[in-house]
Amino acid sequence: MMSRRSLLQAAALGTVGTVCQAADPPFALPKLPYPDDALEPYIDAQTMQIHHDKHHQAYVDNLNKALSGEPELAKLGVEELLRRLDTLPAAIRTQVRNQGGGHANHSLFWQALAPASKSGKPGGQLANAISQAFGSQEKLEESLRTAAAGVFGSGWAWLCAGQGGKLSLETTVNQDTPLSAGRQPILGIDVWEHAYYLKYQNRRAEYLAAFFHVVNWSFVSERFAKLSA
Ligand code: MN3
């Protein structure tokens, strides 16, 4: 470790080039785990491109802007910020709720999708929990579709893992997340029109039927197992 004095001397000599380099913003857009067109024909490439590269990027940029004066809070990470939404400074709370919610919700959304050939089935613990809570995978999907179809305006339908590995369904409006209510989402269905309008226009039910062809059940199963451990 250089002393402050020798650091200043080194800087003066031009040997420390990184002293004044601006830090990277705390939040970054995650890469899609598959190509834009991997979910065709169920979710089209153009929708994926705009949804990820434009919409999700905007949530990340706006969250970074909102947290630019709060480096200590930014270090907590987006999920922890959303869990403690009620305790955040009023000046940033709404932006964390909307932009941070958008960032966290979409980060989970991409991971919980996969090309139809790799969609698979719920495994192990999750398969058991589904038959206990819903009777069958078909009934779970039907309940999720019904919940998602019933969201008025923009929002999400969620499958959540609760205490003792219990499953529950819920819906949220805008970019609200179950995290802020102390629950842990393992699969989310985005029912904002930007998620489906190019291909399905007003036919949300068709999008919802297509959605279940491209769920990454091995990801959702692993997430559930980790959270229930
Ligand atoms: Mn979206």
Image (cartoon, grey):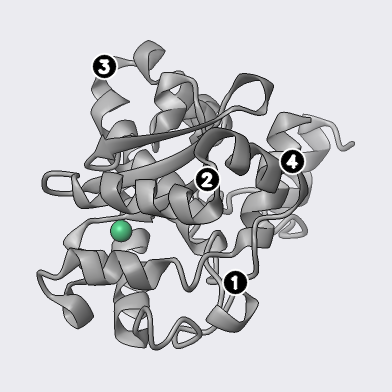
Q: Quadrant of the C terminus?
A: top right
For residue 90, which numbered disc appears in the image?
A: 3
- Residue position marked by numbered label 1 in the rendering: 119
Numbered label attached to residue 225 = 4
Tell me: residue 211, above or below residue 28: below
Query: Where does residue 12 sit, x and y in percent of width and height?
Result: 69, 51
Q: Residue 76 is drawn in which quadrant? A: top right
> Measured from the top left, where is residue 136 in percent x and y?
55, 49
Q: Amino acid at mark 3?
A: Ala
* Mark 4: amino acid: Ala
- Left-right relation of 217 to 102: right
Q: Position of residue 92 (x, y in %)?
A: 29, 26
Going by the numbered disc 2, the residue's amino acid type is Pro
Q: CA distance from mark 1 to mark 2?
A: 32 Å
Does residue 120 appear left or right of residue 94 in this picture? right
Residue at mark 4 to residue at mark 1: CA–CA distance: 18 Å
Cα distance between the residues tagged 1 and 3: 41 Å
Q: For the N terminus, which image quadrant?
A: top right
Dot 1: what SS?
loop
CA gap, disc 3 to disc 2? Answer: 20 Å
Question: Mark 2 and mark 1 in contact (Cβ < 8 Å)?
Answer: no
Callout 3: SS: helix
Judge the density around disc 2: few (<14), some (14-19), many (≥20) Cα neighbours within 10 Å: some
Q: At numbered mark 4, what does the secondary structure look like: helix, strand or loop?
A: helix
Q: Residue furthest front?
A: 135
- The vertical placement of 147 against 170, above or below, is below
